[in-house]
Image (tube, rainbow, N blue to C red):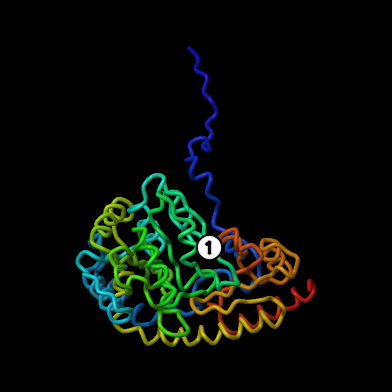
Amino acid sequence: MSMVIEQFMPEKFISPTLKTIPPSGIRKFFDLVSQTKDVISLGIGEPDFVSPWHAREACVYSLEKGYTMYTSNLGLPELRTAIAKYLAERFGLEYDPKDEIIVTVGASEAVDMAFRTVISQGDEVLIPEPCYVSYNPCAILAGGVPISLETNQETGFKVTPEMLEKSITPKTKAVVLSYPNNPTGAILNREELEDLARVIIKHNLLVISDEIYGELTYEGNHLSIASLPGMQERTILISGVSKAFAMTGWRIGYVAAHRDFIAGMVKVHQYTLLCAPVMGQKAALEAFSSCYGEVLNMVEEYDQRRRIITKRLNDMGLDCFEPKGAFYVFPSIQNTGLSSEEFASRLLQESKVAVVPGNAFGSCGEGFIRCSYAASLKQINEAMNRMECFVAKRL
């Protein structure tokens, strides 16, 4: 008896939800850069500094001592203690390292864990845009419904209490705050955070606060919304060593939150990634213990680059909002007559400079591009020279 075997088609087995999520707009241009010679990349948010020597040395020493095993799902106790000490000293936040801090595989895993821990099917999550590319997909993959709050250049790319009030419904469960902001470099001051906190408390909402760029604040010190009255227990604070300590490849992030949230995250963590690599945890421990001076040196260098690249962009005719944090600028390219995608693609092809189109960070990013100044000053100046010639032909 013969059997008719239908042709196997893998795409039929892919989750319909996953099919609705586009690939990362950042990674798209990263891949294009890798295929093009002699490109100056201002596209990827990665420090050009090497990780601090003492952190690297701690990793090597840990390997020599045979630290190659699993750690607790929560992470090394001594690292969690160091993180708690750091948060207390730098931002006035008190967390119990035993059950209110978990070490993650980068801040990216922390974002995913946060959504999967607190979001149920149909819950709405308010997400100010432009924003980092992971928030919307992570909300969708957790069964939630992302609600975009469109900020703009006129208001400094800041979310306002009015935006929150207008968008809150009975299904709203959480608000994502990511300040200093990627891609705009916007920050929120105390008064602005207090105004948001009043709305959040009034409606009994949760905050997922991505503060990975907290140390990269150029005018005053970073203020966490978790430090405001009534906010710590309703805030899931996400950060890590990738940006401030120039340790992107180590993949060490963390979450600080109420123990009930952490207990939920441990379940997600232990059934997916189990624990962050012990060698990276040892390096991060050393970074928190002895490398803060290098953070300050890097911030000083970023500040110089920030002022230079902002002036160069404005001088060439691209209206550029002055970033107050992170290491990105988000200039408008609307006067060139090109869309964000067209500008980025043609700049790469014709001038060998890589930037990220603004619409990768939400529809309200259309008409802008993101440039990272985590590149060397020499590279930034050469990239600006090339971009100036490119722009001059279109103005």
353 on left or right of 275? right
Measured as percent of width and height from the top left, residue 261 is found at 28, 58
Residue placed most toward the observer, 379 or 363: 363
- 350 up-or-down from 121: above or below: below
Mark 1 lies on residue: 129
Measured as percent of width and height from the top left, residue 353 is found at 66, 72
- 259 up-or-down from 41: above or below: above
Q: Residue furthest top?
A: 1
- Secondary structure, mark 1, is strand
34 on left or right of 181? right
Residue found 30% across the figure and 65% down from its top: 103
- Residue 81 visible here: yes
Q: Residue furthest left?
A: 98
Name the quarter where the C terminus is drawn: bottom right
Q: Residues within 10 Å of mark 1 (few under 14, many from 20)?
A: many
Measured as percent of width and height from the top left, residue 228 is found at 33, 73
Residue found 45% across the figure and 71% down from its top: 179
Residue placed most toward the observer, 353 or 173: 173
Image-quadrant location for residue 176: bottom left
